[in-house]
Image (cartoon, rainbow, N blue to C red):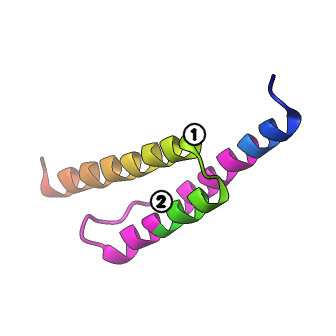
Amino acid sequence: MVRNEDIRREFNMFSDIWRVYKTLLPVGTADDEKYWDAVMNAVSEIMKMYPGKFAEDLLLVLVSDLERRCAENEDQDSGR
């Protein structure tokens, strides 16, 4: 049975991940070390707040999406 505190914690986790995601948009370029360092720092902070497989999986999806957007932006810029 899922407890109210579990639901609240997961809601907070989703909210925190969403806030981080919003702050990381628009996506930086592949060679923008400052941007990607910020991404990794944000992921690390969320993992400290919400240790566990569920948060890790969500954060992997977040980073994967940022990488995808970065590649798409570079493809558009190069005319591919």
Q: Residue at x 46, y 71 (%)?
A: 38
Please, is residue 4 above or below residue 48 in the view? Answer: above
Q: Residues within 10 Å of mark 1 (few under 14, many from 20)?
A: few
Q: Position of 40 compared to 29: left or right? A: right
Query: Which residue is disc 2 drawn over?
Result: 25
Q: Residue at x 51, y 60 (%)?
A: 43
47 inside magenta stretch: no
Q: Residue at x 51, y 47 (%)?
A: 56
Bounds of the magenta segment: 11-40
Query: Which residue is disc 1 drawn over?
Result: 54
Q: Nearer the viewer, mark 1 or mark 2?
A: 1
Question: In 3D space, how far apart are the residues under numbered discs 1 and 2 (Cα atoms)?
Answer: 23 Å
User: Label 1 is placed on what type of residue?
Assistant: Phe
Q: Position of 18 compared to 61: left or right? A: right
Looking at the rendered structure, the secondary structure element under dot 2 is loop
Where does residue 54 sit, x and y in percent of width and height?
57, 39
* Between discs 1 and 2, the one toward the N terminus: 2
Quick one: quadrant of the N terminus? top right
Q: Residue pushed farthest bottom?
A: 34
Please, is residue 24 above or below residue 13 in the view? Answer: below
Q: Residues within 10 Å of mark 2 (few under 14, many from 20)?
A: few
Q: Residue pushed farthest top?
A: 1
Looking at the rendered structure, the secondary structure element under dot 1 is helix
Where does residue 18 sit, x and y in percent of width and height?
61, 50
Q: Main secondary structure of the magenta part?
A: helix
